[in-house]
Image (cartoon, rainbow, N blue to C red):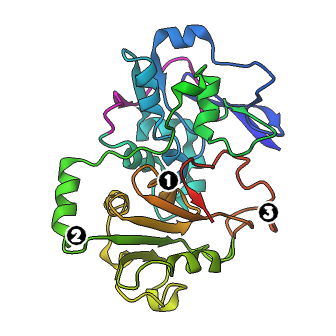
Amino acid sequence: MSIFLRINNNRLFPAGEVSTLGFDKSDGYRIPDNYLEKQEFMVMRTCHGLGDWIILSAMPRLLKNKYPKCKVYLPSKKLLQNIFGDMLKNWGYGTFDASDVVNSVFHNNPYVDGFIDSIDGEIFHDHYRIFDENNDKVPLLNQMMKFWQFKDDEMVDTTPDFYPTEEEMGWFRKFHDFQINKYGYISASSTFGDTAEPDVMLNKIKEHNEDMVWYYYGEVPLTESYFSFLKNVIEVKPLNLTIRQQQILKINADVNYGNETGMNLWTTKYSKTFILGNKKYGPIHSKVGERKRPFKTGNFVNRVEYL
């Protein structure tokens, strides 16, 4: 069971237990017309990991495309802390401030009108979604926009957005050796090898030219990893790059490989992306065993090549 949450006048309220968050497509629930008529919208999540926000990053663009005169806001760090308080620690894991994630994802987004500290009235967040019990492979953002009364042809591209600044692109031009015509990027989280069979991805990587240059980000050094067979490798983690610098390297790669994490789902609009999908629950989950419906929560992303 899950707790359905409401956010009203900058306060969080539990609204009862549900077996599945959202509403079945047959229920007929949709966002109120009078809310849409105001054209002052807040993009909000109740989960605050990097990937949780990344898969909503196209929402401002979709809203502006349908309502060109609307205002689209994101929660500031202050607003997130006021609403969620200590709950944010569930995603920070003691290594980062989860309330900073929104800025990392939406920085320089031309469809965002501001990061605000307060907003009156109801906020329709990710619990307000329309799901199809017979089809798990519907991205969360598509489910949310259906609740927002969007038609299918108004959701042509819900893949995650990223907008680097000129300064960030200047960094890339100085950092990357452009004598390298093509390169690949491999990102392996600490759960790589625990939640799916790694050989599926390793065999796919081996299909590439042996001379291809690879950027590798992993929680263990290359020599201790599953990818030690690669020859021309630049290890990323020791470089202490920011999340956005890593993302610039990834979107400019010829191909991206990784296990299923939010950071790896951020590239699919810009670069061929192969993801080793989670088949089992990992150490951070409260469950154990096989994940029989791995996309039920809406973490499916279009254009990804799932392995």
Res 271 → quadrant: bottom left
Prevailing secondary structure of the magenta residues: loop
Instruction: Indicate whether residue 122 is drawn in magenta.
Output: yes
Q: Amino acid at mark 2?
A: His
Q: Secondary structure at mark 1?
A: helix
Other residues around mark 2 within 10 Å, as few (<14) / some (14–19) / many (≥20): few
Magenta-drawn stretch contains 170: no
Give the residue pinned by disc 1.
50
Report the residue marked by disc 2.
176
How far across and how far down the image is residue 16, in percent?
Answer: 80, 32
Q: Is residue 69 above or below residue 277?
A: above
Magenta region, residue range: 109-126
Q: Which residue is mark 3?
A: 287
Q: Quadrant of the N terminus?
A: top right
Say the numbered circle drawn on residue 161. Answer: none
Sequence-first disc among 1 and 3: 1
Q: Mark 2 touching mark 3, by CB under 8 A?
A: no
Q: What amino acid does circle 3 point to?
A: Lys
> Disc 2 or 1, which lies upstream in sequence?
1
